[in-house]
Image: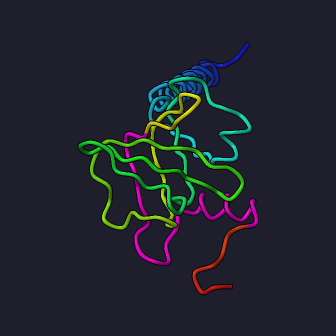
Amino acid sequence: MKSLKKKRRVQVISVAAVALVLSTVLIGYAMQDGINFFRSPSEVMADPPAPGEVFRIGGLVETGSLKRGAGAEIQFAVTDGGASIPVSYVGVLPDLFGEDQGMVGLGSYDGDIFRATEILAKHDETYMPKEVVDALKEQGVYQAPDGS
């Protein structure tokens, strides 16, 4: 027969383990809507996301694709060298946004066009998000800022 001290210790450990599992599940559930996965244009074309799925897309703004529409609507294409995805955005673009520059957009893909709700541009002439650099390296089109 177990002593009262050992029994109490097992109960405390059991309650702590259940509380830890429950808190982990609740945190994961709460973060479910806040997690946005990054995809390159090639990944979007190879495995299209579900309609309405919110994700981040990144790459280079394709040269010659930037078109300003009526009002604050802007259309352009984002590429990683392997594929190109048309993007539509309504709003004010960041100051450093431009053609042949790195960008990351948040939004959803309807099968034809990526509808962005947020556009992020690089910070300076040498910065590019790590995910974009990795995707461009996979395509073999990345060139380091120093030209190498």
x, y percent for residue 13: 59, 27
**93 in relation to 42, above or below:** below
Asked if the magenta segment contains residue 128, the reply would be: yes
Total marks placed: 0
| Quadrant in the picture for the C terminus | bottom right
Residue shown at 39%/50% (left/top)? 119
Q: What is the x, y in percent for residue 74?
A: 36, 47
Q: Residue at horizontal 75%, vertical 60%? A: 138
* Quadrant that contains the N terminus: top right
Left or right: 102, with 89 as reference point: right
Q: Which residue lies furthest to the top in this view?
A: 1
Q: Residue at x 49, y 55 (%)?
A: 65
The percent coordinates of residue 139 (x first, y second) are 74, 60
What's the magenta region?
Answer: 116-140
The residue drawn where x is 48% and y is 53% is 104
Viewer-side residue, 24 vs 36:
36
Q: Quadrant of residue 20?
A: top right
Is 28 inside the magenta-drawn segment? Answer: no
